[in-house]
Amino acid sequence: MRDLPGELIHVDVKKLAAIPLGGGWRSRGRGYPGEDATSRRVGYRYIHSAVDDRTRIAYSEIHQDERAVTAAGFWARAAAWYQSIGITPQRVITDNGSCYRSGLWHRAWAAAYETRGVFGLATRHPCNEACPLWVKARGLRQR
């Protein structure tokens, strides 16, 4: 845990299956008419979240994708929101997802750095190769 609010912000995306209108099979029961209809497939929703390491104050948005454009726009809004409540983001840590490795995400970091002084980091676990994979992959948002 950090000493000051905004010293480290964790950013991540969680992929969840969308629920069709009228509910899924749990509300209608297995084998209802139209259960396998392709028109009822609704895909996924992606919850983009930013969590302050010190205060655990979270900012989240639900989006239709996890592309770099969406992630960069989310970070711009999250950084502005943290500023509005008096928390100045200084560092950002993410997993190594594709939307965070893109050039657009790095340009969003650069823009935040120029206006707010934000420094970006990628997740690196301090243990050696003998560490189990699940230890390396767990982030703050999943805890």
Image: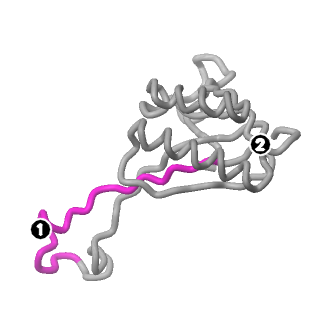
Q: Residue at x 35, y 59 (%)?
A: 17
Residue plotted at (72% across, 47% down)? 52
* Residue stretch rendered in magenta on the structure: 30-50
Q: Is residue 34 left or right of residue 80?
A: left
Quadrant of res 132: top right
Q: Nearer the viewer, mark 1 or mark 2?
A: 2
Image coords of residue 58 (percent x, y): 66, 55
43 inside magenta stretch: yes
Name the image quarter holding the N terminus.
Answer: top right
Vertical relation: 65 (above or below) 40: above
Is 63 colored magenta in this rendering? no
In terms of image quadrants, where is residue 23? bottom left
Residue 88: assigned label: 2
Residue 64 left/right relative to 94: left
| Direction right: furthest residue | 3
Q: Percent from the top left, x then y, of residue 139?
A: 61, 40
Q: CA distance from mark 1 to mark 2?
A: 48 Å
Amino acid at the residue labelled 1: Ala
Residue 136 versus residue 108: which sits nearer the camera? Answer: 108
Secondary structure, mark 2, is loop
Q: Which residue is label 1 attached to?
A: 37
**Mark 2 and mark 1 in contact (Cβ < 8 Å)?**
no
Q: At 76% across and 56% down in the image, what residue appears?
A: 85
Crowd tier of the residue under label 1, counting other residues whose Cα lies within 10 Å: few below 14, some 14–19, many 20 or above: few
Identify the amino acid type marked 2.
Thr
